[in-house]
Amino acid sequence: MRNIMFTAYFSNLEEFADLPDYNAIMELLMIINIQDKLNREKKMTKVMFCLITDRDNDNIENFIKNYYNKKVWQGLINLDVAAKNINWNDLTDKEKKEFLIEKWKVLFNNLSDDYFVVDKSEVIRSLEELKYSEWNIISTLFKKKLKYNKELYEIVLDISPKRAELAMISESDKKKISLKEYQTRKIVFDLNFKNFKLINEGTLILENKLIFLPPEIFDLKEIIINQ
């Protein structure tokens, strides 16, 4: 079953400069911590809230009217939330996380019990824990390991709102070797790899799933020497 898409929508990138980066990791955190607590028979495909900069209050009344004990229309659940007088770009990392999680709590608190396979309080508790956790995920990209110079490595993606780092972690001493850094918001497209291969005793090639994207190529000899 496909993952649910969780996102916060905004209309002006200048007002929410790094929100796409927070969205990218927030979606992964919601999939890991919240998705399995939701009733997939409701056929939700996208759960989101829209940040409305001229609203003083979250549009809860309309949200309840559309979703409470009702079928999900075309898989979409959406809440318009108040973002008036919120200067996102001036918020600290902690304040940004708290703001986003509070809005997710409003959304889930106002869904009826038929949207959940657990008590709704468990979802709210999980969200509260996320508010104070480090938004950092290290994800292994491939089941198989890379063997290079008699050492085994896992190829991983280390993600936070600030950056996404493609790296290798050695099995023997857990040393991390950085391969490349990306914008977190671009990981869905730029880091969508299907396979890797090692050629010429040191050239690592990561093949993209998207046919219009070229492979990523790394000279491991040079990279390891420099680290």
Image (cartoon, rainbow, N blue to C red):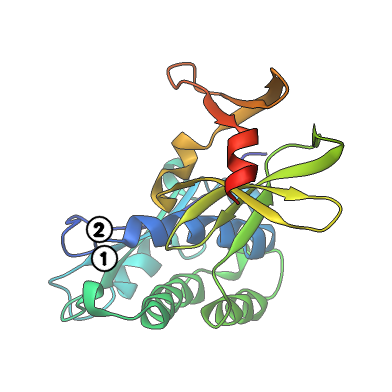
Element marked by disc 2: loop
Judged left or right of residue 116, residue 89 is left
Residue type highlighted by circle 2? Phe
Residue at the image position 70 percent from the left and 22 percent from the top: 197
Label drawn at residue 51: 1
Q: Is residue 196 above or below residue 134?
A: above
N-terminal label among 2 and 1: 2
Q: Is residue 8 left or right of residue 181?
A: left
Residue 60 sits above or below residue 210 on the image: below
Residue 223 position within the rendered picture, expressed as x and y whole percent measured from the top left: 59, 41
Tag 1 secondary structure: strand
Q: Position of residue 161 (x, y in %)?
A: 44, 63
Identify which residue is drawn at 44% across, 61% down: 67
Residue 12: image tag: none
Three-letter code, disc 1: Leu
Q: CA distance from mark 2 to mark 1?
A: 5 Å
Which residue is denoted by mark 2 in the rendering? 10
In the picture as drawn, the residue positioned furthest to the front comes out as 225
Camera-side residue of 188 and 177: 177
User: Looking at the image, can residue 7 be seen?
Assistant: no
Q: Specify few, some or many for label 2: CA neighbours under 10 Å numbering under 14, 14-19, or 20 or more.
A: some
Residue found at x 46% / y 75%:
101
Place of residue 217 in the rendered image (x, y in percent of width and height, measured from the top left): 54, 27
Foreground residue among 85 and 138: 138
Quarter of the picture containing the N terminus is top right
Residue displayed at 29% across by 80% down: 91
Q: Quadrant of residue 19?
A: bottom left
Residue placed most toward the observer, 221 or 64:
221
User: Where residue 227 appears, x then y in whole percent?
Assistant: 60, 52
* Viewer can see residue 16: yes
User: Would you call the spot at circle 1 few (<14 residues within 10 Å), some (14-19), or many (20 or more)?
Assistant: many
